Image (cartoon, grey):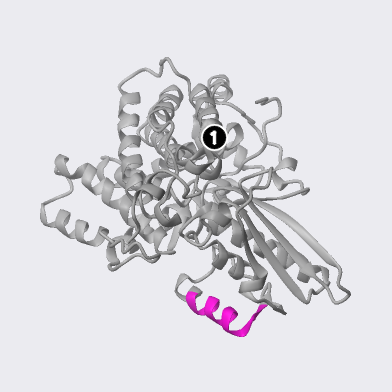
């Protein structure tokens, strides 16, 4: 992959505040539906009917990932960032009962979910997560738009140029080698490089405010997940465990007990992904299926590292974002393309490098930690039972968080020199994802999804 003119990717693409259970299957479709509805209403060409076809992975696991509900909400003008999770059931029920919705919250249009929301299991060539929206007008003419949910809640409209194409970064990089070279030449940390590049979108004060909001949202998802009880939706009868685990850990003594550290980390990751599975508010980091890894590692830093600071938290997130950008540019963070190595594996790699940065490690040690984090997630499949982001997804986040911390300290014990580079492991992940059979990539057609009898 050429990096002569690396594409501009912002931290806001790696960390977005939205709802569960999936960034590619819930957040992306909601954004695409919202964009289509806004285009219709803004143009003043009101349709008498709209339809949406969900293709490929969005069709095969769309019901379990709430893709159908997300489309209805997006057409009605809701966004992942602002929709009230407590009101979603009522909004969906009203659309179904009335056979109509208010396009972009401004223009009523008929909508029959059995006729106008279609699941098409065939795959379109450009991406496994495809949507086709069609508007029909009074004269019988039609207008269609095709969108792809390319991972992490990011969407791409076919034929449209992304906004990032017009951004000019101060220190563009398309590989880890280039990132390290910039750091060496400019005497800058990875976090400083990313912060400087974010100036193409906003000032430092706004960037810091965004990072603080992300941190606060991550912490809030941990707290909500630790407080909730009951059964997760979807029919698998999976019980929430985070609250009971927290109560047991609290009874066993102070968090400074070394034997409890990883148990707390696992709890925090578990809590976030139980919240995600319930359709609650989480931070896409870089996906919803892997949303628990970075919050758990961040909470580890803030809770167990003596002298942890807000600046350290920001460096952790900025550095993690830089690593995530490399995966987006050189491979993919979509499980429908890469399997779960592209979700939990990438989150583990991001968290490992970010933690090294927060702990004062060098750029070379950051790159080493990120490489270790992915190297031991290579080949990880995405085969969710019942198409739900529950088994094995929830527990997989706990493993990703623990591996990230382990990778960080392994790197810190070295001087940054190692055999396999981050660029090489990213390319290996890409090739592995391409070689992986499609039934193991978020289709629920293989692996655990077919070998475990649903209850």
The magenta-colored residue range is 89-101
* Image quadrant assignment for residue 259: top left
* Image quadrant assignment for residue 261: top left
280 or 25, nearer to the observer: 25
Q: Identify the image quadrant of the N terminus.
A: top right
* Majority SS type along the magenta span: helix
Specify whether residue 383 is in view. Answer: yes
Percent across and percent down for residue 368 are: 42, 24
Task: Residue at 28% x, 68% y: name it.
Answer: 230
| Above-or-below relation of 31 to 362 | below
Name the secondary structure under disc 1.
helix
**17 relative position to 228: left or right:** right
Q: Identify the image quadrant of the C terminus.
A: bottom left
Residue lying at the far left of the rendered structure: 252
Residue 95 painted magenta: yes
Specify whether residue 76 is in view. Answer: no
Percent across and percent down for residue 46 are: 80, 74
* Image quadrant assignment for residue 82: bottom right
Percent across and percent down for residue 2 are: 68, 25
Classify mark 1: residues with Cα within 10 Å, few (<14), some (14-19) or many (20+). Answer: many
Say which residue label 1 marks.
Answer: 327
| Above-or-below relation of 143 to 318 | below
């Amino acid at each position: 992959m050429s990096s002569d003119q690396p594409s501009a990717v912002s931290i806001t693409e790696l960390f977005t505040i939205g709802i569960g259970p999936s960034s590619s299957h819930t957040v992306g479709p909601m954004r695409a539906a919202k964009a289509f509805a806004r285009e219709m209403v803004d143009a003043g060409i009101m349709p008498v009917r709209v339809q949406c076809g969900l293709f490929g992975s969005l069709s095969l696991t769309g019901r379990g990932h709430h893709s159908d509900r997300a489309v209805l909400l997006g057409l009605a003008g809701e966004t992942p960032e602002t929709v009230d999770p407590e009101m979603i059931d009522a909004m969906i029920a009203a659309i179904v009962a009335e056979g109509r919705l208010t396009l972009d919250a401004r223009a009523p249009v008929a909508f029959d979910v059995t006729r106008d929301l279609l699941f098409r299991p065939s795959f379109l060539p450009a991406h496994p997560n495809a949507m086709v929206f069609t508007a029909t007008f009074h004269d019988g003419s039609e207008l269609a738009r095709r969108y792809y949910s390319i991972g992490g809640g990011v969407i791409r409209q076919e034929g449209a140029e992304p906004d990032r194409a017009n951004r000019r970064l101060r220190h563009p990089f398309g590989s880890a080698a280039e990132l390290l070279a910039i750091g060496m030449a400019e005497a800058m940390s990875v976090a400083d490089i990313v912060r400087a590049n974010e100036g193409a979108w906003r000032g430092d004060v706004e960037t810091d405010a965004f990072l603080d909001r992300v941190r606060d949202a991550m912490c809030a998802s941990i707290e909500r997940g630790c407080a909730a009880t009951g059964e997760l939706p979807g029919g698998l009868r999976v019980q929430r465990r985070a609250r009971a685990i927290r109560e047991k850990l609290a009874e066993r003594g102070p968090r400074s007990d070394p034997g409890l550290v990883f148990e707390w980390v696992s709890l925090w990751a578990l809590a976030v992904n139980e919240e995600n599975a319930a359709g609650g508010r989480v931070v896409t980091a870089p996906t919803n299926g892997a949303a628990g890894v970075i919050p758990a590692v961040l909470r580890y830093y803030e809770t167990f590292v003596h002298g942890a600071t807000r600046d350290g938290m920001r460096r952790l997130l900025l550095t993690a974002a830089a690593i995530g950008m490399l995966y987006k540019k050189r491979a993919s963070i979509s499980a429908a393309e890469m399997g779960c190595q592209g979700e939990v594996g990438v989150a583990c790699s991001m968290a490992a490098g970010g933690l090294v940065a927060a702990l004062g490690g060098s750029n070379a040690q950051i790159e080493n930690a990120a490489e270790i984090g992915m190297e031991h997630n290579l080949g990880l499949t995405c085969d969710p039972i019942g198409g739900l982001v529950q088994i094995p997804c929830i527990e997989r986040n706990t493993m990703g968080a623990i591996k990230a911390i382990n990778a960080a300290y392994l790197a810190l014990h070295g001087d940054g020199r190692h055999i396999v580079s981050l660029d090489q492991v990213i390319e290996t992940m890409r090739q592995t994802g391409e070689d992986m059979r499609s039934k193991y990539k978020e289709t629920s057609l293989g692996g655990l999804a077919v070998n475990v009898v649903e209850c």
